[in-house]
Amino acid sequence: MATINKLVYDAREAVRQLVDDTNISDRYIIYLYNILRAQRLRQDANDLQKITDNSVLQTLCLEVEEVDAGTCNTSFDCDTVMRTVRPIPKPLETHLKAALTAVRPTNRIAVPFNFVTKEKALYSKYSPFKYAIYAFLDDDLHIYFLSESNAIRLLSCVTITGIFEDPLELKSYVNCCGCNTPPPCFDLMTTDYPLQPHHIVSIREEIIQNLLRTIQIPEDKNNNSDDN
């Protein structure tokens, strides 16, 4: 595994574009990594025979607040509605659903909430388990929580785990609610880029070929400092 800064440097070194006056920006290389990463992981996620690799998952914590029932954006009579204060980063979209693997209380040993579709959550009051807490992701990228139990009002912070389209968006999120200066969920210098090594290898080669076409220079097959 490697940080995104290391991956960017590696790509630059491969095409001999380490000087400050290059027209290839770090932002562009990161963009290529993120786009190709999303493609690879979407293919993996759509293959139901594959198990999600934990190395591609990211986790963040968000505070929860009570909102007006009308926020459900439906005519259904929802009573108490809790919602994450902030929207989550855009999760990877698969054929079946958004690639969120768990929404749970901040207590690590607690049972995750019932993470379901919006329709199932709204009609959960007719379920035999209506006092359980149901969570769903809405179009505004907030996660909403519904339950017939008054315990739902005790929610103050939740943990969300999944695969996100742009892992760098987690730079502005933390893994702790109410903590003093907690570190961000993603750091360019220290956080491993959430992708399996075999995908990194294939994506690296694709990016190098892309950059070579951009600058129109031959690749150094011998990985040495010669200009030939």
Image (cartoon, grey):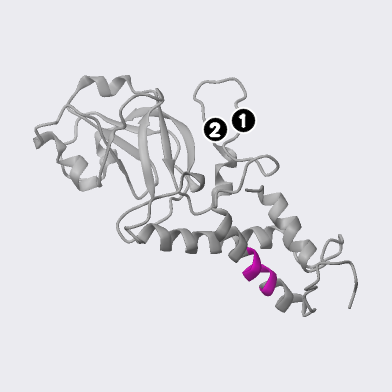
Q: Measured from the top left, where is residue 79 in percent x and y?
A: 19, 30
Report if the CB atoms under discs 2 and 1 are less than 8 Å apart. yes
Q: Residue 208 magenta-drawn? A: yes
- Residue type, numbered disc 1: Pro
Front-most of residues 222 and 109: 222
- For marks 2 and 1, the one nearer the N-term is 2
Can you tell which quarter of the image residue 206 is in?
Answer: bottom right
Q: Please tell me whether mark 2 sits on a helix, a strand or a loop.
A: loop
Q: Please tell me whether mark 1 sits on a helix, a strand or a loop.
A: loop
The residue indicated by pointer 1 is 183
Farthest front residue? 222
Can you tell which quarter of the image residue 203 is in?
Answer: bottom right
The residue indicated by pointer 2 is 174
Q: Residues within 10 Å of mark 1 (few under 14, many from 20)?
A: some
Residue bounds of the magenta highlight = 204-209
- Residue type, numbered disc 2: Val
The residue at 36%/61% (across/down) is 46
The residue at 68%/58% (across/down) is 27
Is 29 situated left or right of 121 in this image?
right
Is 61 situated left or right of 137 in this image?
right
Q: Measured from the top left, where is residue 125 in percent x and y?
A: 13, 34
Q: Residue 79 magenta-drawn? A: no
Q: Measured from the top left, where is residue 1 in percent x and y?
A: 62, 48
Is 27 situated left or right of 153 in this image?
right
Is 75 situated left or right of 59 in this image?
left
* Quadrant location, the C terminus: bottom right
Main SS, magenta residues:
helix
As drawn, the label of residue 126 is none
Alpha-carbon span between mark 2 and mark 1: 6 Å
| Numbered circles on residues, count | 2
